[in-house]
Amino acid sequence: MAHAKKVSGVVLFAALVVAMAMAFSSCHAADYCHSIFPCSNETCFYYCQKNNYKNFQTYCKPGEYYPSCCCRVPGA
């Protein structure tokens, strides 16, 4: 009987972990990246603004041939 309680407790805990992971994964930010040259804070800001992203944060990251401007949109 004690073994059954232990197994049901483990199953309940696993279900809780899965439910929390699903809830928190829906609150993540989406990154929309595109190669632009030159990629700077200014050019990346204008790129994201031109593409009508709202409440975005910008950053540049290295790309294969050109750097990529990324627009991070929270909650997208």
Image (tube, rainbow, N blue to C red):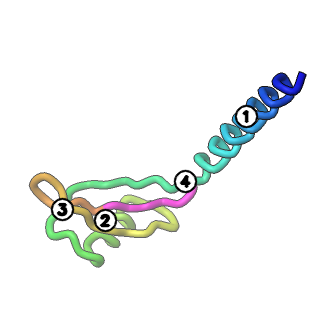
**What's the residue type where badge 1 is placed?**
Ala
**Outermost residue to the bottom:** 42
Q: Is residue 25 left or right of residue 33?
A: right
| x, y percent for residue 67 | 18, 62
Q: Mark 4 points at which residue?
A: 28
Which residue: 46% across, 53% down? 30
Numbered mark located on residue 52 in the image: none
Q: Give the range drawn in magenta.
A: 70-76
| Residue 65 sits in quarter | bottom left
Task: Give the mark nearest the N terminus, 3 or 2.
Answer: 2
Residue 15 image offset from top left, x and y in percent: 73, 34
Q: Is residue 42 above or below residue 19?
A: below
Q: Is mark 1 on a helix, strand or loop?
A: helix
Tag nearer the camera, 1 or 2: 1
| Amino acid residing under circle 2 | Tyr
Distance (Cα) linking label 3 and label 4: 24 Å
Along the polypeptide, which appears first: circle 2 or circle 4?
4
**Which residue in the structure is indicated by mark 2?**
47
3 or 2: mark nearer the eye: 3
* Tag 3 residue: 67
- Indicate yes or no whether the magenta region holds residue 67: no
Of label 3 and label 4, which has the lower sequence position?
A: 4
Whole-number angstrom distance, CA of label 3 to CA of label 2: 13 Å
Q: What residue type is labelled 3?
A: Pro
59 left or right of 21?
left
- Please state which of the two labelled residues, at mark 2 or mark 4, is closer to the viewer: 4
Residue at the extreme front of the image, as rendered: 2
The residue located at (53%, 60%) in the rendering is: 74
Tag 3 secondary structure: loop
